[in-house]
Image: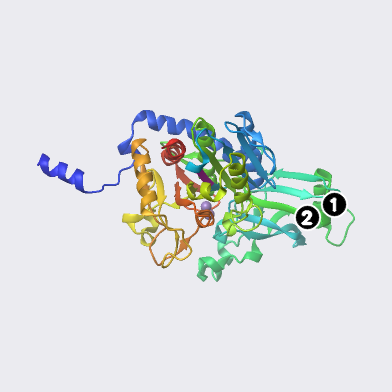
Amino acid sequence: MSEKISLRDELLYDKKTVYEKANKARFDAAFTYAEGYKAFLDDAKTEREAVTAAIALAAERGFLPYRLGDKLERGKKYYYNNHDKSLFLFSIGAEPLAKGIRIAAAHIDSPRLDLKQVPLFEDGGMSFLKTHYYGGIRKYQWVTTPLALHGVVAKKDGSLVQIKLGEAANDPVFYINDLLPHLGHETDKLPLGEAIPGERLNVLVGSMPMENEEKDAVKLKTMALINEKYGITEEDFLSAEISAVPAFPARDVGFDRSMVGAYGHDDRVCAYPALSAIFDAADSAHTLFCVLADKEEIGSEGNTGMQCEVFLDLIDEIAAATGESPARVRAAAKCLSADVSAAFDPNFAEVFEKRNTPLLSAGVVLTKYTGARGKSGTNDASAEYIGWLRRVMDENEVVWQAGELGKVDIGGGGTVAKYIAKHNIDTVDLGVPVISMHAPYEIISKVDLYETYRAFLAFFRAE
Ligand code: MN
Ligand code: MN
């Protein structure tokens, strides 16, 4: 009997959860770590807020602001703020750059509702702001839920007005109307994807008319209040970036408090561990690089997305400062593209292939390939690189699992991985399994979050 068991242990792969493989000290550490993460989530609901929050944390830890062209010194730590929406942090280690750099790349934008450029209108005694959704959302999830407005208004005089309303306990919140069931019998028959068209995602922002006004009196009153609070006019919305995001804070979920419910786990649940790992591994001999990218949810476009060449510019500058060829630095570099994965959900078991789907609480997920159908649009990480990572994870007792996003022909998804790999950098996806990804309130497990942090630490320090 015992011989049979050891043969099984020796030959067969058995996926185990963090609860089965680790101990109470680890669980306690995970719970403590999650407190810092929840605070970061509440501070950083947009990419701009995430950049501000990350810079504050980095500055406390001795990271210096860097501008392209500045002198770089070995042993020092820097951050590069790219247009206030993406952030690059790096520490130049003692080891020759020819040995490569270690890169952790996550994104800090999340699905949401952006205001249109001419958003304000009045109808039926109510004033609304028109939105254009950003990223992949299931639109029916965004109605009848409290929303906050976050963003900036760039005025013609060059000043920037910060907007954040709906988060403090006594702030008003905003809202998207839905039909009452009594009148919903016809729309109840529509497919979920058609029940709430994008043009119906209008945010309710007022219902009081301006005194002694006949036409658009509610709109005028709303605009007068906005003007009073922020000093802007309706025309200023033309050069604004304001988003409606869920108004609720991050909370523990479950009797055991083992999970966190929040808006925007995708992908702050990877950005925060990547950030805290570069802080805690700054003693590593390697040169470390942490990317917090914008625009992943819409294809990594623009000058703040991962496709922007500033990523190469920074590697070029680091290589030049140490007298190394940038191409050689990239060829020897290793990257963890840190993004979330879909956790198996027994309520929707039919879309998952259980043997290859990440399980909640089974640790950080290594995803060899993403993409759709026949691996279309994926970076398919090499066996050799994953073999190296397996050793690093196991030597550091990181609980990890392999995973892919649902059944082969059901759907698919992408990450920033391919935009890094195309520069000849060994790259693999790694991240936290999420329940209800892209919903206004997503769920993650605290032990998975903590193993992700431990994975980055191990990666940054490993030989
Ligand atoms: Mn993501
Ligand atoms: Mn996403």
Q: Kindly check if marks 1 and 2 are in contact, taking CB atoms under 8 A apart as contact.
A: yes
- Indicate the position of residue 331 as horizontal and vertical percent values: 49, 50
Question: Per the image, is 95 magenta?
Answer: no
Residue occupied by mark 2 = 239
Front position in the image: 123 or 437: 437
Residue occupied by mark 1 = 156
Say whether residue 217 is visible: yes
Q: Using the rendered view, name the quadrant where residue 228 is placed.
A: top right
Q: Is residue 71 above or below residue 343?
A: above
Q: Using the rendered view, name the quadrant where residue 450 is placed.
A: top left
Identity of the residue furthest to the right in this view: 212
Q: Using the rendered view, name the quadrant where residue 28 is placed.
A: top left
For the C terminus, the image quarter is top left
Q: Main secondary structure of the magenta part?
A: strand
Identity of the residue furthest to the left in this view: 1
- The amino acid type found where label 1 is placed reads Lys
Front position in the image: 187 or 192: 192
Chain part drawn in magenta: 101-105
Does dot 2 land on a helix, a strand or a loop? helix
At x 51%, y 55%, the residue is 415
